Amino acid sequence: MDEPRLYGSDYSVYVRIVRLCLLEKGVDHHLLPVDVFAPGGPPEDHFLRHPFGRIPAFEHGEFSLYETGAISRYVDEAFEGPPLQPSDSIGRARCNQLISIADNYVYPDLVWGIYVERVSKPEQGIATDHDKVEAAVASGRRCLAAIDALMRDGPWLVGQGPTLADLYLAPMMDYLLMTAEGRELIRPHAALEQWWSRMASRPSMTAFAPG
């Protein structure tokens, strides 16, 4: 069977999510570079794979797909390997709830609102927007408290093994915890700290560190 082709860049949270899914399933793949932040935006032919010009885009044989949620679920269901979605309806609902929290709150507020402002912008010589950071920290407290409450005692976000929820949240937490604000935000949540220690040491996480 053809190895899947993934279009994107290793700095992308969402490209990394799909790569984590593939590695956790034991599936080799090809990463073909597409930089959406390049001058002039992504190459014109990328819009044939993703009409909105985002990353990742995915191909497996003749089948093409975009949107990380769809790709990650396809990877879980199309390939052999450990399941990444709970088998019961309650577990699947909780997994999807946590993915939605990651998409709608963690990524915009904690990756863009804290990491980008504190790390990425200064590296480019751009001033940090301190008001944006302050607002993101307030949102971050709610985000991590909500995730911690849903996780309860762990060891993983949903059940006894890693799921798509863990693989979604982990790349976002990796960026957040590169900041002093992120390390302060997670400190009151012991179960979430312990989860991060387990997640950060998994071979898939160390194999696909952001470039």
Image: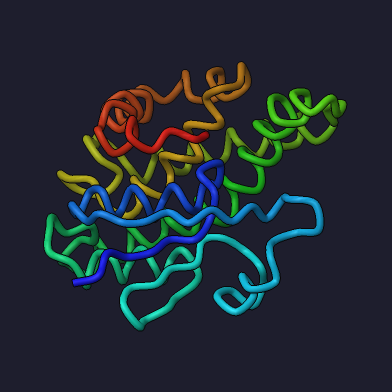
Q: Position of residue 10 (x, y in %)?
A: 50, 44
Residue shown at 84%/24% (left/top)?
125
Q: Is 210 left, or right, of 76 in this rendering?
A: right
Q: How many marks?
A: 0
Q: Quadrant of the N terminus?
A: bottom left
Residue shown at 29%/39% (left/top)?
204
Q: Is 81 left, or right, of 60 in this rendering?
A: left
Q: Give the answer, above or below, for where 94 lies relative to 174.
A: below
Residue shown at 53%/53% (left/top)?
33
Q: Give the answer, above or below, for where 184 lies relative to 1.
A: above
User: Foreground residue, 128 or 38?
Assistant: 38
> Hey, which residue is sitting farthest bottom in the picture?
62
Q: Is 47 left, or right, of 15 in this rendering?
A: right
User: Foreground residue, 67 or 45?
Assistant: 45
Q: Position of residue 22 (x, y in %)?
A: 28, 55
Q: Is 105 left, or right, of 57 in this rendering?
A: right
Q: Position of residue 60 (x, y in %)?
A: 33, 73
User: Foreground residue, 103 or 29?
Assistant: 29
